Image: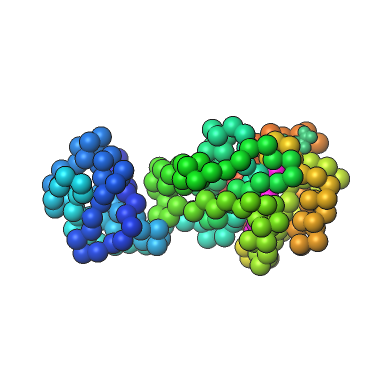
Amino acid sequence: MSALKRFFVEKIEEITSLSGEEFEHAKNVLRLGVGAEVILLDNSGKEYTAVVSAVEKKQMLLSIVREEVGEREANAEVALLFGYLKNADKNEFIVQKAVELGVKKIGVFSSEFSSAYMNANKLERLNKVAKEASKQCLRATAPEIVYYPTLQDALCSVADFEHKLFACEFAQKSEKSVSDLSKSGGRVALVVGSEGGFSREEAERAKELGFSHISLGKRILRAETAGIALTSIVMFALGELGGVT
Ligand code: SAM
């Protein structure tokens, strides 16, 4: 039996209202009616099983039947900060894959060599992609996508993370061993540049802020490849991708 359909709502109450786009999708696409059972998510990490009790013009009312703590969130707290890319699809691809891989904080930044600019609609779209990806992989939360106008702002947003990795194609070698991460525990911040990459000054500034330069090998990877590769390597090292031996 396919998993129950999942919807994000603002607030969970005994009788919860589903409105807006989520309501339109439930009513007009999925054709859910009274008696249908769904999962409601309020980004608290809990999953609420609910039954449709009324379908109105602009909202659906649902009665909460039971609540459980979602069991698919990562134990490790990993943040991915990436340089905003010119190609919208690639930004969405990175967000979608980072959510599937269990990342808990996602930031997009502009840096010295950025050639693409963020606006409210684009940011709203990325947050929508995060929610859809979260529902698809059965997570109970969707990371909020936060925009940082400068690299400095992005780096400072994870200043208190225990491990800070800065992917740098001109790093001679990695200054920190990813495989040691699981032994020491703590939160991990990952930073990947946009198409234009980072300037030497930016790389140096990251180091001053406690970041370790990480090499992903001798080939120059596309930003989206580097973002997903580094996230996958780190999530695997933290035991979040199963025990592939
Ligand atoms: N500046 C690069 C150039 O001259 O072709 C392009 C940057 S690359 C497309 C985008 C980002 O991916 C880089 O800023 C870096 O964060 C990451 N990256 C790509 N290849 C890498 C490698 N071999 N090692 C570490 N990071 C890499």
Q: Quadrant of the N terminus?
A: top left
Residue depicted at 63% across the width and 51% down the height: 149
Query: Can residue 23 be seen here?
Result: yes
Place of residue 152 in the rendered image (x, y in percent of width and height, measured from the top left): 71, 56
Place of residue 32 in the rendered image (x, y in percent of width and height, measured from the top left): 19, 41
Quarter occupied by residue 222: top right
The prevailing secondary structure element of the residues shown in magenta is strand
Tally the marks: 0
Q: Residue furthest right?
A: 172
Task: Please tell me which residue lies in front, 192 or 180.
Answer: 192
- The answer to whether residue 13 is left or right of residue 71 is left
Residue 191 in magenta? yes
Does 240 sit above or below residue 29? Answer: below
Residue depicted at 31% across the width and 43% down the height: 21
- What range of the chain is rendered magenta? 188-193
Q: Residue furthest bottom?
A: 160
Task: Please tell me which residue lies in front, 132 or 87.
Answer: 87
Quarter occupied by residue 116: top right
- The answer to whether residue 117 is left or right of residue 112 is left
Residue depicted at 46% across the width and 45% down the height: 124
Residue depicted at 86% across the width and 45% down the height: 172
